[in-house]
Image (cartoon, rainbow, N blue to C red):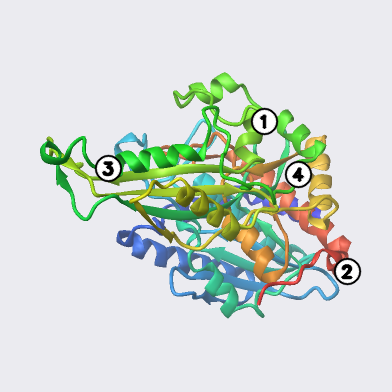
Amino acid sequence: MSQAVADRLVADQDAILERLKALLRLPSVSTDPAYDAGMVATREFLLARLTELGLQKVQLLDGGGQPAVYGEWLGAPGKPTIVVYGHYDVQPPDPLDQWVTPPFEPAIRDDRLYARGASDVKGSTLIAVETIGAFLAVEGGCPVNVKFFLEGEEETGSPSIRRIIDTYRALLAADAVLSADGGRASTTIPTLNTGSRGLCKLEVTLRSAQKDMHSGRYGGAVRNALHELARLVTTLHDEAGRILVPGFDSDATPLTNRDRADAAELAGDDSLFYGSVGAIPHGDPAYAVRERVTLRPSIDVNGMWGGYTGAGSKTVIAAEARAKITARLVPGQDADAARQKILDHLQAHCPAGVTLEFSPLGGNSPSSTLPDGHPLLVAAEAVVRQTLGRAPARARIGGTLPITGIFQEMLGIDTLMFGFAMPDEDVHAPNEFFRLSSLEDGLKAWPLLLSRLGDAGAEAFAPWRKQPTA
């Protein structure tokens, strides 16, 4: 069954490519209100396509921000129900002058499709959509029950996703999530993305006086808020880059030999890693570079400001300074607890007479991991072996894909990331592209994966379901 569907998809590849180009022409930038019309047009495109393919209950799921696009096909009794996730929003195209061709006018060069959103993640999202449509057209049904959840706020941190899930909890009930987001970790080694780091964010405000002061009248006699904040944030790490926050990773799940072996297989040339951004090595020397950026937690100051930053000079001693801090989290770490440990550490190192205020920045995103033996992982690894001739390395994402942890937390279901983007496709940068070969790879692999999940049956997922939060 899956082979006939894959053959149909490959035969229709030119038409699918034209639909992808049409989708890429729609400027769906979620962070900028100037692109609201593009967001609306993209939703209309997806609603129309899901309806045309034969999905039912096609609708928008509204959580107060950019709504998600939903559609379902539930005609496979006894088979697992899979939420198919993708996102239709994209990053801003700026700086525009660095694009070889306009960002929302798709162009093919050297078997690559260039456009904003081609790699992240409209290409892989459309692969998933077209695969379900091909099953319905060729076989009259799918091997699994399907619920599409195409998000419109992934690029802004998914601020509405918890409200959407809470509002439509019954509609989204399922056995597992198959994500078109989360691409391949190597251009040469077959990989499967099995999890992502979580994220917590906060802003720190430090005050050292009631008001700014003239540096000629007060310099050398009072604390400078900027100096104090700079000194304070340096206490987060030692000289090598080890985190010094007490107990910060005490609840982290220990790394396994398999974790470290997979990371080693995917490790690149460290000199190229640092040379590509003109940086020098830093971080806990007990771990290899790839382990530091995917398997271990991190704390970073993302911005720090205060005093005068305009043109010229203003001889002022700042009374207030601020910093934005984020922490990437690994399995086992509780995001609220991690943030509190950072706050406690900063407060403990704050000198007398200086005050600190803290505020969280949006909701936390928990880390996630797909456990060994999960039916999603078993099926996907078999598909990779069948199509590429070898078992894949398991890769974790150093960044944060909010839905993986949030679906696990709120619906009790796990996620496999099965996207086909490559790591060198200039995601979020000018001249983003998607390989045409990846389009064909995805159209061959998705039917095989859905068929294997259908063969497993709904009962195979029961032991892996978790108790969701209320």
What is the spatial separation of the Cα atoms under label 2 and label 1, in whole angstroms? 40 Å
* Residue, disc 2: 459
Kindly identify the amino acid type of the residue bearing the numbered disc 4: Pro
Instruction: Name the residue rendered at 86%, 52% in the picture.
Output: 373
Between 411 and 419, the residue placed more toward the observer is 411
* Residue, disc 1: 287
Q: Is residue 247 visible?
A: yes
- Work out whether mark 2 precedes mark 1 in sequence or the reverse, and give the earlier one: 1
Q: Kindly identify which numbered label has been placed on residue 254.
A: 4
Kindly identify the amino acid type of the residue bearing the numbered disc 3: Arg
What is the spatial separation of the Cα atoms under label 1 and label 3, in whole angstroms? 38 Å
Q: Position of residue 278 (x, y in %)?
A: 44, 23
Q: Kindly identify which numbered label has been placed on residue 223.
A: 3
- Work out whether mark 3 precedes mark 4 in sequence or the reverse, and give the earlier one: 3
Could you tell me which quadrant the N terminus lies in?
bottom right
What is the spatial separation of the Cα atoms under label 4 and label 2, in whole angstroms? 30 Å
Of circles 2 and 3, which is in front?
A: 3
Between 45 and 63, the residue placed more toward the observer is 63
- Work out whether mark 4 precedes mark 2 in sequence or the reverse, and give the earlier one: 4
Q: Position of residue 111 (x, y in %)?
A: 54, 34
Rate crowding at label 1 as few (under 14), some (14 to 19) or many (20 or more) other CA atoms within 10 Å: few
Instruction: Name the residue rendered at 34%, 58% in the picture.
Output: 32
Query: In what element is the residue under mark 3?
Result: loop
Between 102 and 210, the residue placed more toward the observer is 210
Q: Is residue 129 visible?
A: no
- Work out whether mark 2 precedes mark 3 in sequence or the reverse, and give the earlier one: 3
Disc 1 + disc 3, Cβ < 8 Å: no
Left or right of 317? Residue 334 is right
